[in-house]
Amino acid sequence: MYKSLLFILGVVFSGLWWSCERAAEQYDIVVYGGTPAGIMAAIQGQKMGKKVILLEPESRIGGLTAGGLGDTDHGKISTIGGLAADFYRRIGVKYGQPEAVWQFEPKVALAVFQELIAENKVDLKYHERLDLDNGVAKEGSRIVSIRMESGNVYKGKVFIDATYEGDLMAKAGVSYFVGREGNARYGEKNNGIRPEGENELPGGIDPYRVAGDPASGLLPRVNADAGGNAGDEDTKVQAYCYRMCLTDSVENRIFIEKPEGYDEMEYELLFRALEKGMPKDRCFKLHLVGNRKTDSNNHYGVSTDYNGGNHNYPEAGYAEREKIRKQHETYQKGLVWTLQNHPRVPQEVRAYYAAWGLPKDEFVENGHWTPQLYIRESRRMTGDYVVTENVVRLREPVSDPVGLGSYAIDSHHTQYCLDKEGYVRSEGGFYLPLKQPYQISYKVMLPKKQECANLLVPVCVSATHAAYGSIRMEPVFMILGQSAASAAALCIEKGIDVQDLDYADLHKELVKGEQILENPDNEAYKVNAFEK
C-alpha cells in the first residue's frame, strides 16, 4: 500500500509539473544568461521580430563588462561590428566622445546595457536560475521548456545558453569538456600541461609551510607535481579572479578592511616572492578606466588570481559555487589589506598600493564589491566541429564565419606546483599574440544534432582550451550572441533545426546586422599568425 501511495503521489506531482509547463507562456527565443552575449542575443531577436525572453540568474546584468572588466580586451578594434560596436560607441557618448570608448567604469557599462534593453523592449526577468535537478524538458533532441528554481517554466522554439558556466547546455544533454585537452587529441602545440621551464614566479621559492621542513606540508594550493608531462590532458581550468574596481579618489574611496576568515598562510607565497625580488607593481594592475577608477586584474605569478581554488567550479552546484566565489573574494580582499598593512610587505610596496580602495559609487547593492567572478573558462561544448589553435593560427580555413577574433591566445595560470628542483612554480599561463584576425565558424555554437537540435551556445563554445584562450573575450561574446540570435530567428522562420541552416541565408542576415566577417584590412591570411 505504501508503494501504491508513492506511485499515486508521483503521478499527481508529475501532472502538476506538466500542467504548469502547459500553462507557461510560449516564446520564440529563450535566452538564458544576462551576460553581454545574452543581452545582444535578446536585442537581435527583438530586432528580427521574434518574441524573446532574457533570463538572468542573479540580480545584475552585463556579466564581466558591467562587473569590473572596463579595460576591454578588444584585440583589433576594426574587427568589432554590429551590436557590439554600437555598445562601445554608446559608452563613448556617455563620456562625451563621438567615437567608441574601450575603457570605462562598471556603472557606465551597466547604464548602457539597461538603456539598450529598454529601447528594444526586451522582456527581462531577474533571479531566474535554472533548476539543476529537473530543469530541462525535451522531446527527442529538442528542448521544449526550461524550469527555474522559482518554479517558473519557459517554453521556446530555440534556446540560447549565454552563461559563462554552460548549465543549460550541460543539463540538455550536450557533450562538453572541462580542463585542458592533450596536444595529441587535436594536433595542437599549446594545449595541456605546460612545459617545466615556464614559470612566472621568482626562482628558488621554498614550498613548505615552515621553510625547509617538508613535514610541515606544502603551502596552500601548491601541488607536489604538475599532474603529468608537458602536453598531457587534465581536468584543471585556468584561474579566476574578481576584476577589482578601485579608486584613489579621497572623496569616493572606502578602504578594504581585513576580511572575516583571513588566513595569513594564504599570503606566505606572496611574502616569499617579494623577498625574492618580485617587482612592487606586479601584485595587481592599476589600469585606469575613467574618473580615477581602475580595472585591477592579475599581473604576476602571485596576484589576484586564486590559483587552484576554482577547479571544482564548472561542475559544482549553486551552493558550492557560492562557497568558491566567497573564497576568491576573501582572498582578494585579504590581498589588498595585506599589501597595504602587513609588516612583511616591504614599505615601498605598501606605499605603492596605499591609496586604493573601493569606489562608493560602484556596486552599491553589493558592498561596493563586484558580484561577478571572472569565469575565464568553465565547460566548453564538444560539437561535431571543435575550433582548435590551428584555426586561430590560420592553418585551417573557415567557410561559415559569424564573426572575427583577434586577441592573443591567453591562458592564466592553472596551478602552483613544484619544479624539478623542488621549488614553487606557476603552471598553465601563456600569452601568444596574433598578427591577424581569424574567422569564427557558425559551427562553434552548434551541439551535435542528435544531442540537441534547437540550442545555440555563444559563450561556452565548441573550442579547445588553447583556442578558447583567444575567443573568450567580451566583445567576441557580444558578436557571437548577436549571430546566435540571427540564426535562431532564421531557423524559426524556416522551421528547421539549428544545424540545418543554410549559411548563405545566415550570411545575408549577418551583413545586414553590420557584423564584420572578413579581415577589415584585406590582408592575405598567412600560415603562421604568431608574432613569436
Image: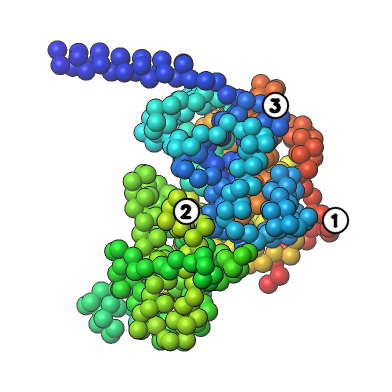
Q: Locate residue 97 relative to residue 411 in the image: left or right.
A: right
Q: Which of disc 3 and disc 2 is earlier in sequence?
A: 3
Contact check, label 1 and label 3, Cβ < 8 Å: no
Estimate the spatial distance between the alpha carbons at disc 1 and disc 3, rounded to whole Å: 34 Å
Task: From the image, tell me which residue sits under label 3.
Answer: 49
Task: From the image, tell me which residue sits under label 2.
Answer: 364
Residue 279 in picture, x, y percent from top left: 51, 83
Viewer-side label of 2, 1: 2
> For the residue marked with disc 3, what is the amino acid?
Gly
Q: How is the image coloured?
A: rainbow
Q: Residues within 10 Å of mark 3 (few under 14, many from 20)?
A: few
Viewer-side label of 1, 3: 3
Q: Residues within 10 Å of mark 2 (few under 14, many from 20)?
A: few
Task: From the image, tell me which residue sits under label 1.
Answer: 522
Q: Please indicate, yes or no, whether residue 408 appears anywhere in the rendered image.
A: yes
Q: Which of disc 3 and disc 1 is earlier in sequence?
A: 3
